[in-house]
C-alpha cells in the first residue's frame, strides 16, 4: 500500500492473493480505513512510502 505523508492509505493492492477473490477485496477495502505514523526522511519530515503488510482473517 502507499501511505501518505499524513499517514492515510492512498493506494492499496493485493501483492499475494489468498486464493479467494472476496477475501482479497475485503482486505483492500479494510486497509483504506487504517492510519499509520508516516515515514520520515533524513530531515525528519513526513514522506509518502510504500509498505507491504499481511492482512489476516480470523473466523469466530
Image (tube, grey):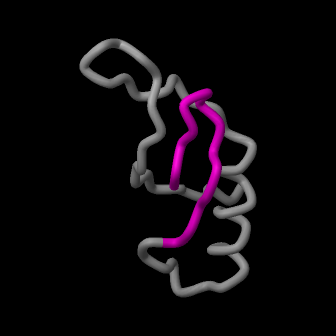
Q: How far from the left and from the top, in percent, is residue 48?
A: 47, 39
Quadrant where the C terminus sits is bottom right
Judged by its main secondary structure, the magenta piece is: loop
How many marks do you count on the picture? Answer: 0
Residue range highlighted in magenta:
1-14
Q: How far from the left and from the top, in percent, is residue 23?
A: 67, 73
Q: How far from the left and from the top, in percent, is residue 2?
A: 52, 51
Residue 59 image-quadrant placement: bottom right
- Which residue is at a point 43% across and 51% down the rendered structure image? 53
Q: Is residue 30 magenta?
A: no
- Which residue is at a point 40% across and 54% down the rendered structure image? 52
- Which residue is at a point 43% across and 72% down the rendered structure image? 15
- 37 relative position to 60: left or right: left
Front residue (pair 59, 29): 29
Residue 45 image-quadrant placement: top left
- 38 relative position to 9: left or right: left
Q: Residue furthest left?
A: 42
Q: Is residue 13 magenta?
A: yes
**Does 2 appear above or below 35?**
below
Front residue (pair 34, 22): 34
- Which residue is at a point 72% across and 53% down the rendered structure image? 30
- 56 relative position to 58: left or right: left
Amino acid at each position: 500500500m502507499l501511505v501518505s505523508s499524513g499517514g492515510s492509505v492512498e493506494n492499496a493492492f493485493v501483492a499475494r492473493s489468498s486464493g479467494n477473490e472476496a477475501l482479497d477485496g475485503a482486505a483492500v477495502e479494510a486497509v483504506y480505513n487504517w492510519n499509520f505514523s508516516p515515514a520520515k526522511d533524513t530531515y525528519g519530515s513526513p514522506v509518502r512510502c510504500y509498505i507491504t503488510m499481511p492482512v489476516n482473517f480470523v473466523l469466530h
